[in-house]
Image (cartoon, rainbow, N blue to C red):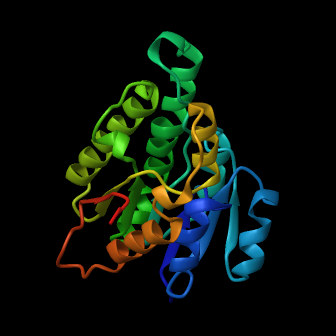
Amino acid sequence: MRPLALITGAGRGLGAAIARDLAPSHDLLLGARSTDSLAKILAELPGARPFAVELTDYAEVARLTADIDRLDVLVHNAGIADIAPIAESSVQQWRTTLEANVIAVAELTRLLLPALRAAHGHVVLINSGAGLRANPGWASYAASKFALRAFGDALRGEEPVLRVTSVHPGRIDTDMQREIVAGEGTEYDPTQFLTPQTVARAVRNAVETPRDAHPTEIVLRPYRS
């Protein structure tokens, strides 16, 4: 029986790249808000199955996870980046960011803990450089990523049969990145960013690390020669 991996935010960008990298060795559940947003990657990976749900709809998440009794890999890739200085960050922005980037991750993980324990599974948290260092203008996003790192550290300590890896990439060439750069008012240069394929390869390497090692943290930065 092939191992099963659930990847959230798999419809495009990094999530789709991770799905492609794990597809040769894993059965896949691909998460997104709707099946329509997964249409392209599902057509590309015909053995994959959709896990279509709004991750903050906790009742529906509970319903969809109820029948998963064994899960080898859980990749938390879904998230939002709403960038603004503190003076312009509303209460709603803080709540929405923390809800999507931390609380939804914690609840999905909690619901899947029995399945992960059964498989001695691996939880991969796609974090950010902002989870290690907070820059001006990124307060709510960085706070959510610092919290996500704390969640990973606590999970690792509480669940010794699991492996928990926090991945801290620098900025990645994705549609989300284009939106961020447009908001910053600067010119977009994809050569300044990591490719999704490079980060996906790091995720696969972590998952394939032999069981005698625990890859707890991966930090990636764009290389400029």
Residue located farthest toward the right when viewing the structure as drawn: 36
Camera-side residue of 129 and 38: 129
Looking at the image, residue 75 sits to the left or right of residue 121; the answer is: right
Looking at the image, residue 60 sits to the left or right of residue 118; the answer is: right
For image coordinates 37% across by 69% down, the residue present is 121
Vertical placement of 88 versus 51: above or below?
above
Place of residue 184 in the rendered image (x, y in percent of width and height, measured from the top left): 56, 32
Camera-side residue of 86 and 68: 86
Residue 71 in view (yes/no): no
Which image quarter is the C terminus in? Answer: bottom left
Residue 125 in view (yes/no): yes
Vertical placement of 123 versus 182: above or below?
below
Residue located farthest toward the top when viewing the structure as drawn: 87
Looking at the image, residue 106 sits to the left or right of residue 17; the answer is: left
Q: Count the marks.
A: 0
Q: Quadrant of residue 119?
A: bottom left
For image coordinates 43% across by 74% down, the residue present is 201
Vertical placement of 23 versus 102: above or below?
below
Residue located farthest toward the left when viewing the structure as drawn: 212
For image coordinates 56% across by 50% down, the residue present is 78
Looking at the image, residue 158 sits to the left or right of residue 66; the answer is: left
Place of residue 155 in the rendered image (x, y in percent of width and height, measured from the top left): 29, 49
Q: Quadrant of residue 55?
A: top right
Place of residue 97 in the rendered image (x, y in percent of width and height, measured from the top left): 53, 30
For image coordinates 41% across by 75% down, the residue present is 204
